[in-house]
Image: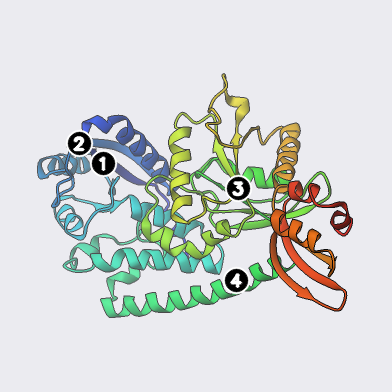
Amino acid sequence: METVQNSEKEKAILVGCGPKRNEWELLSTLEELGSLAETSAAEVIGKAVQFRDRLDPAWLIGKGKAEEVAQMAEEREADLVIFDHELSPAQIRNLERLLPCKVIDRTQLILDIFAQRAQTKEGRIQVELAQLEYMLPRLAGRGKELSRLGGGIGTRGPGEKKLETDRRHIHRQIRDLKKQLEEVKKHRRLHSERRKKNEVVQVALVGYTNAGKSTLLNRLTGAEVLAENKLFATLDPTSRMLELPSGQQVILTDTVGFIRNLPHHLVAAFRSTLEQVREADLLLHVVDAAHPEAAEQIAAVEKVLEELQATDIPTLMVLNKADLLDGQGIEPDGREIVRISALREEDVDKLKRKIENLLRSKPMTVHLEIPIERGDLLSALHRMAEVVSAKANDAFMEIECRLTDKQLEKLPSELKQQVT
């Protein structure tokens, strides 16, 4: 999937709409939309906001405001107008007839960034699938208007191919891409089963985009992953071996950054990649503690984790960039937290020790032999641990069970000696 290189940045106008009572949140997400536009190599030349309790089903912002935006776009020679909501097919059709330039929404903008940043085959498949599923319901009645797209932001990836494709062809492409993703998923599942069989511990980095996950991965493992002060600087997941102070080695995986209002198409398309989060033994939720909206970003990440059914996985909240804080910052609120700066060696060591301590409480699989006549030991084991299997031979019961370090300490000495 090639990235379109423009000699000049596209000039963009941002448009937001929502209730007056949510003014702060509306302006905040519009500011974030501007950062996304800059990440996609656009220059923001204007913003328009309309306060209304209900979105206009035909225009999103109402026809009068749409005409104002059209006049602004014409006067400032804008190349595109970006709406901070997902536009319906009817809204796109009406707005494109009125506005003198290209019209895209937040979802298209994020898809465009992902199209630029996807490096692996799986990443490119996932982005293309998300783009095709987004465009499919928006094809009807968009003949002449589509000719305005002509390249640039919102049209990367399969982008311009939609000019000559019909629904049937897109359905076929979607089926093919899903089939390819299923093959990748099977391959990933085999790797996962092999890691579980070898009892390899997995730790996953999650967090809001630009929270410092890639920097932390580099500092913890010596990896050389791209780390920029940009939204979605890295897209494809990266796994590296992390050695803890005790010498234990675990796999540390950096996942795609989350964002408020992450498009449903992306969550669906990237589900196979995000499933790595669900397979982790420990999540490191990296937070930019110095960001003025850190609490809102935490909520956005936790919402996606809930969608992925990953809320039951032990999680350590890593409050990064603590060196930029004047005061205490975010309060624990019952969460397991650690405050660090990824740039300080002593903080990185502190984080490694914290990870090790938390992993010690992770259940381990052990194999024990209990003499047949020692029913008391067998009963104690059933009370204290999760017995996975029990098989009797002539003189012993061969037991496979799962237990934590704390449970191990409470085992009768005869059994504890068998655990190395």
**Residue of label 4:** 189
- The CA distance from mark 2 to mark 3 is 42 Å
What amino acid is found at the position of numbered circle 2 in the picture?
Answer: Gln
User: Which of label 1 and label 2 is nearer to you?
Assistant: 2
Residue bearing the label numbered 2: 50
Are dots 1 and 2 in contact, CB under 8 Å?
A: yes
C-alpha separation, residue under disc 3 versus residue under disc 1: 40 Å
Q: Tell me if label 3 and label 1 are in contact, CB under 8 Å.
A: no
Tell me the distance, in whole angstroms, between the alpha carbons under discs 1 and 2. Answer: 8 Å
Which mark's residue is nearer the viewer, 2 or 4?
4
Q: Residues within 10 Å of mark 3 (few under 14, many from 20)?
A: some
In the picture shown, does residue 292 fall above or below 247?
Answer: above
Please identify, in this view, whether the residue under mark 3 or under mark 4 is nearer the observer. Answer: 3
Q: Position of residue 175 (x, y in %)?
A: 39, 78
Picture coordinates of residue 225, whole percent (x, y): 64, 51
Mark nearer the N terminus (3 vs 1)? 1
Tell me the CA gap for discs 4 and 1.
Answer: 43 Å
In the rendered structure, the answer to whether residue 127 lies left or right of residue 315 reads left
Q: Amino acid at mark 4?
A: Arg
State which tag comes first along the sequence, 3 or 4: 4
Q: Which mark is residue 314?
A: 3
| Residue at which label 1 appears | 15
Element class at badge 3 = loop
Mark 4 vs mark 1: give the one in front: 4
**Helix, strand or loop status at disc 1:** strand
